[in-house]
DNA sequence: TTTTTTAAAGACTTTTTTGTCTTTTTATAT
DNA sequence: ATATAAAAAGACAAAAAAGTCTTTAAAAAA
């Protein structure tokens, strides 16, 4: 399971990508409101993303967060790695100090398949992919308007 | 990712199952040593398992932990549920306050497949299955002896 | 009955994660 | 220039998870 920080990061970056398409640069207040995340915690997580070069920001009036239009599509795994590292994808399923093909734990074979599929999913899915789904109405980023 | 407590619980119960086959009832000192887990923390987790009726124990000389030979095979998901609950299997992949098929987040479809496979794995795998693999040499429970 | 061995119980501590608050810096608008 | 609006920075606080310590209860052996 992802950390809350990673979850907030993904939701925030998707929201930013969506607004960027309309040439807008949202601030952390707006972002945190729209993704239902704590304001200052969201700000801190976005700072981390900027420091790790996943995202750009400008300060002062009219400032906010935005993506470099030149940069290549951002995969979810890059965000996860920036926020919490890669342990989710390398750790043993029952907590042995390391995962090993040659000295596997008793669920290694089955667990590794699932863990690898999750890694593939996060590697092959980009922020833009998710933004597309929100725009097309196939998905939502919050639980503000309920069915 | 499982909590450390769940990981220790699974390893501990597998070890107990193995020893029980030789009519032995290990104590938490032995168990924690063999699964490389903190002694008192292991004891606390085993207490929880006993309280939740996953396991039996006897105090005093010659006492220790053991399974009721009458009880049905114990699946990993029952242990996980006892220790940390079911949120791993019900939670939204990007942290929306609830997961929903009708108002899905943008990775719901793909994520739910993986999450459900993990649920199936933990539902269909029993402590005895894992004990079998240790006994047959197909798997290990610690990293004490390394290749 | 006393000693020994074991789990149970619960208070306590430490570490990690999550979250908040205040001040500083930077950019823009007036 | 000054005021305003925004992110950056960093100290701080709260909550959760992980782990430890001490005492109590129970069972069996001596
Ligand atoms: S050794 Fe446990 S998952 Fe690989
Ligand atoms: S709504 Fe996000 S995984 Fe189901």
Image (spheres, coloured by chain):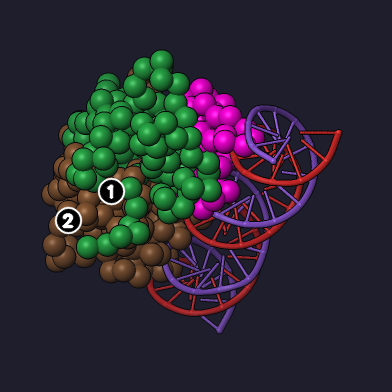
Chain colours: A green, B brown, C purple, D red
Left or right of residue B125: residue C11: right
Q: Which residue is mark 1?
A: A140
Q: Which mark is residue A98?
A: none
Q: Tell me where residue B47 appears, x and y as whole percent.
A: 40, 64
Mark 1 Cα-neighbour bin, 10 Å: few <14, some 14–19, many ≥20:
many
In the image, which residues are magenta?
A: A37-65
**Above or below for A47 versus B23:** above
Left/right placement of residue B137 relative to residue A84 reads left
* Residue drawn where x is 30% and y is 60% of the image: A145
Have a look at marks 1 and 2 and say if they share a chain: no
Residues under labels 1 and 2: Cα distance? 10 Å
Report the side of A113 relative to A81 (left or right).
Answer: left
Q: Chain of mark 1?
A: A
Q: Nearer the viewer, residue B108 or A144?
A: A144
Task: Report if residue A60 lies within the magenta region.
Answer: yes
Q: Is residue B53 above or below residue B79?
A: below
Q: Which residue is mark 2?
A: B102
Is A13 contained in the magenta span? no
Q: Is residue A60 visible?
A: yes
Q: Residue B126 versus residue A3: which sits nearer the camera?
A: A3
Write the residue at 38% across / 64% down.
Answer: B48
């Amino acid at each position: 399971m992802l950390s809350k920080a990673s979850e907030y990061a993904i939701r925030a970056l998707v929201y930013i990508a969506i607004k960027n398409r309309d040439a807008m640069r949202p601030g952390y207040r707006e972002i945190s409101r729209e993704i239902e995340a704590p304001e200052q915690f969201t700000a801190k997580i976005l700072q981390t993303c900027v420091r790790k070069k996943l995202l750009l920001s400008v300060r002062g009036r009219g400032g906010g967060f935005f993506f470099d239009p030149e940069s290549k599509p951002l995969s979810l795994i890059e965000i996860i790695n920036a926020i919490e590292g890669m342990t989710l994808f390398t750790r043993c399923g029952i907590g042995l100090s390391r995962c090993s093909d040659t000295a596997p734990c008793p669920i290694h074979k089955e667990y590794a398949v699932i863990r690898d599929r999750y890694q593939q999913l996060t590697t092959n899915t980009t922020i833009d992919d998710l933004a597309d789904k929100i725009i097309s109405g196939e998905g939502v980023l919050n639980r503000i308007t309920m069915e």
